[in-house]
Image (cartoon, rainbow, N blue to C red):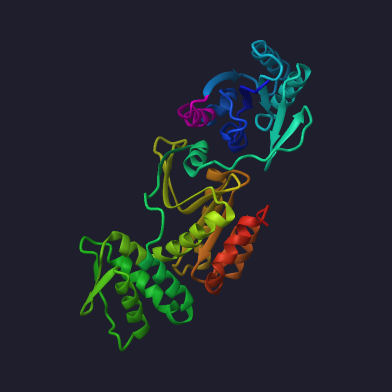
């Protein structure tokens, strides 16, 4: 008899509940949510994802998530409407008492029970672990973790001139490293209506800096008139202000999408979510991708920071990963500059992957290795 309904226990980790619901082989017509008072927002987020996909949602309030007997009685009432095999329990979420109570009742009445890790494990009746389809997309993943507004650019790739520019800069780091900091500064100063800035030093005094101007001009991102640098548009100015490194990393991720089976990928993602205060909280993700049903976040930095700033970036990246990605998510910092020893130690402690300075030439291999690792470290 086909399973038409899944009963799930709502918790702060929504993805183990979501992935079996989106798997074509497991997808039910209806999902029943058992929701404690503390988990109402999490249930709302899942419901908002499932209803547009045609999955019926039924919710039951759990007034005391630690009361096993009350839970058992609630589940008994629910199961009265189902024959054995019509409904399955996903025992991954909820409190331990909720999971124990649900498991005991389902098994007693011979209804299937499964648990989700990196695959689906059948607890009753015993069966071989089942691979979960990897159809989860970024918007659904971020929405499940409470993102109310998600903005992603429409473009799907890095245009050829910019791709060539990024490779030129990375392959010639030894020549251009010092002057790229100056370009960052000039691009920041050009954040005005005219998108222009005056260059103090000429090509004889700063030949490598002017070489960089030529590289950006050849890509159609700027023009030089005397000592005036004018950017073609705001996107071009952003690219010069460090966005080129994001474009470089994003281009490499796109190359890996097919070979590694990346499910979804985007860059320059903006998220808004509700907080305890009245005002929504805004977060930005340089590059976000879904691989093996887990969120992977990449932060790209070209600015030279002091030690405390390095640490701040690492803590913010760690916080964003936990907030929007959950326990199985990963984070990487891609930096044009070297990090201080203390920051290297902090990154290891926080389980944040690093690719810095001269390692950028091998970023493709770093990304492959990072995606393939089952654990963060």
Q: Residue at x 29, y 73 (%)?
A: 217
Chief secondary structure of the magenta portion: helix
* Image position, residue 253 (x, y; %): 51, 58
Image position of 69 (left or right of 351): right
* Image position, residue 345 (x, y; %): 64, 64
Closest to the observer, 245 or 337: 245
In the picture, which quadrant includes the C terminus?
bottom right
Image position of 56 (left or right of 7): left
Say how many tags the image has: 0
* Image position, residue 277 (x, y; %): 43, 36
Q: Residue at x 66, y 56 (%)?
A: 373
Q: Quadrant of residue 331?
A: bottom right
Q: Is residue 216 above or below residue 272?
A: below
In the picture, which quadrant includes the N terminus?
top right
Residue 146 seen in the figure = yes
Residue 343 seen in the figure = no
Outermost residue toward the front? 1
Q: Residue at x 73, y 16 (%)?
A: 69
Q: Is residue 280 above or below residue 28?
A: below
Is 164 part of what is drawn in magenta?
A: no
Q: Is residue 229 above or below residue 54?
A: below
Task: Report the span colored magenta.
Answer: 43-55
Closest to the observer, 256 or 323: 256
Q: Residue at x 64, y 56 (%)?
A: 372
Outermost residue toward the bottom? 204
* Image position, residue 273 (x, y; %): 44, 39
């Amino acid at each position: 008899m086909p399973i038409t309904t899944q009963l799930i226990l709502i918790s702060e980790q929504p993805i183990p509940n979501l992935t079996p619901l989106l798997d074509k082989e497991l997808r039910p017509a209806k999902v029943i949510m058992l929701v404690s008072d503390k988990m109402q927002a999490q249930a709302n987020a899942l419901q908002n994802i499932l209803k547009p996909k045609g999955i019926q949602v039924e919710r039951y309030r759990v007034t005391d998530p630690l009361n096993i007997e009350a839970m058992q009685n609630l589940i008994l009432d629910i199961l009265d409407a189902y024959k054995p095999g019509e409904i399955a329990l996903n025992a991954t979420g909820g409190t331990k008492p909720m999971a124990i109570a649900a498991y005991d009742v389902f098994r007693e009445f011979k209804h299937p029970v499964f648990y989700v890790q990196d695959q689906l494990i059948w607890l009753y009746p015993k069966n071989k672990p089942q691979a979960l389809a990897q159809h989860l997309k970024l918007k659904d993943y971020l929405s499940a973790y409470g993102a109310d507004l998600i903005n992603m650019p429409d473009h799907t790739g890095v245009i050829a001139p910019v791709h060539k520019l990024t490779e030129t800069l990375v392959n010639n780091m030894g020549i251009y490293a010092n002057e790229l900091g100056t370009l960052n500064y000039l691009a920041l100063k050009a954040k005005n209506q005219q998108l222009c800035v005056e260059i103090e030093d000429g090509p004889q005094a700063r030949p490598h800096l002017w070489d960089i101007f030529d590289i950006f001009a050849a890509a159609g991102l700027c023009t030089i008139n005397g000592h005036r640098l004018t950017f073609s548009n705001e996107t071009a100015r952003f690219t010069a202000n460090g966005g080129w490194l994001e474009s470089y990393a994003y281009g490499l991720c796109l190359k890996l999408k097919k070979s590694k089976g990346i499910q979804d990928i985007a860059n320059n993602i903006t998220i808004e979510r509700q907080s305890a205060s009245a005002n929504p909280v805004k977060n930005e993700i340089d590059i976000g991708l879904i691989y093996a049903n887990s969120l992977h976040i990449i932060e790209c930095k070209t600015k030279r920071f002091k030690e405390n700033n390095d640490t701040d970036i690492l803590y913010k990246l760690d916080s964003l990963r936990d907030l929007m990605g959950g326990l199985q998510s990963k984070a990487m910092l891609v930096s044009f500059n070297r990090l201080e020893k203390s920051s290297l130690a902090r990154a290891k402690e926080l389980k944040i992957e690093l690719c810095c300075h001269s390692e950028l030439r091998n970023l493709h291999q770093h990304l492959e290795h990072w995606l393939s690792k089952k654990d963060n470290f």
